[in-house]
Amino acid sequence: MPAPRTRLAALAALPLFALALGACGYGSEASDTDGKAKIAEGAEKIEGLDSVKIGYFPNLTHATALVGNQEGLFQKELGGTEAKYSQFNAGPSEIEALNAGSIDIGWIGPSPAINGYTKSQGKNLRIIGGSASGGVKLVVNPKKIKSQDDVKGKKIATPQLGNTQDVAFLNWIAEKGWKVDAQSGKGDVSVLRTDNKITPDAYKSGSIDGAWVPEPTASKLVAEGAKVLLDEADLWPDKKFVITNIIVRQEFLKEHPKAVEAVLRGAVKTNAWIAKNPEKAKASANARLKADSGKPLPAEVLDPAWKSIRTTNDPLAATLDAEADHAVKAGLLEKPDLGGIYDLGPLNKVLKAEGESPVDDAGLGVK
């Protein structure tokens, strides 16, 4: 699916892509919670900071944040500086919180990161690391759709107009040679923008024939009898594409580089722990989900969803650029200048200290 990386020039307005902020589409409220770990007695504060305010979604695609919070790995790296957590249900509220200084660092999807960067004319956030790849599938009613060609003429849900999965599905449709009006969703395929919370009910009622959605919604549909027709990872080089990034306020990065490094070190160590302890990490993530949202995922949803998500330190920058290019082709985004959206210097410093290989910004880093 992705074309070779194309540098996107000329910043312009983003009339429709602003809708992409709600990539995970679960609402817009945030709430503060305390992490599992407590500050060790006598621990020194980093750069004199009382706290670092961290935001994320109670969603498996934010597994690094979930597990890092639950296991106290961020707090361990921050020492006497408190890790304060806020949970968000949609991209707009997290970007607003970042802009307002209510959070300093956050886990967020590629579409809101792009939009937040371009709407501030490159002045507010930076992407400082990767977090997750994969976890997006086209799941369908097997009685109505038995092959990819059968998708033509059917009703397929995506989370929101212009969001990351919506753009990917529109691009896939175009690659098939079919025509769909991006704004209305009408054409050779009926694209129905449906909140992830109600997509399973829409499937059960027969209102939709399938959905191009992230986990755990995909596995929830499978639990209702749907079948996976396509894993989006199969469309990308090396089966990798960005689904979650780590962002930071530029002002906070400038003023508190050691605190940023501490959080990134916690993320790198969390990802290493997840890789070495997949079953424990899955249970840890689900425990955090229960604490944050009041409801853990059942095993029939948790197990397949967890398997399809890969935590990563690499932001997979070329795939973010390709995703933006797909939105431009679909008519949902005017060409933005993404130069400077990444600052991977702090992460590469941490990776070097941990004996890991550096990651690349695909030419979209700070100069």
Image: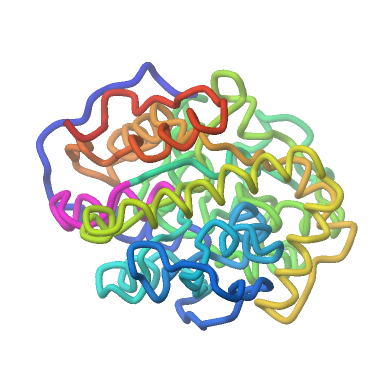
Q: Residue 116 is drawn in which quadrant? A: bottom left
Outermost residue, right side: 299
Outermost residue, front side: 42
| Relative horizontal placement of residue 352, taking residue 150 as reference (left or right) | left
- In this view, 161 is above or below 51: above
Residue at coordinates 45% horizontally, 44% vertically from top-left?
A: 187
Q: Could you say which is closer to the camera, residue 121 or residue 276?
A: 276
Residue at coordinates 71% horizontally, 62% vertically from top-left?
A: 71
Residue at coordinates 61% horizontally, 52% vertically from top-left?
A: 64
Q: Position of residue 233 (x, y in %)?
A: 62, 30
- Does the stretch in magenta take in 118? yes
Q: Could you say which is closer to the camera, residue 295 or residue 291?
A: 291
- In this view, 248 is above or below 198: above
- Does the stretch in magenta take in 112? yes
| Relative horizontal placement of residue 30, taking residue 321 as reference (left or right) | right
Q: Position of residue 351 (x, y in %)?
A: 50, 32
- In this view, 5 is above or below 44: above
Q: Position of residue 308 (x, y in %)?
A: 73, 40
Q: How is the image coloured?
A: rainbow
Q: Quadrant of the C terminus?
A: top left
Q: Residue 359 is drawn in which quadrant? A: top left
Q: Give the mark count.
A: 0
The answer to whether residue 107 shows anywhere in this view is yes
The answer to whether residue 155 shows anywhere in this view is no
Q: Could you say which is closer to the camera, residue 197 or residue 85?
A: 85
The range drawn in magenta is 109-126
Q: Position of residue 87 (x, y in %)?
A: 53, 73
| Relative horizontal placement of residue 254, taking residue 272 as reference (left or right) | left
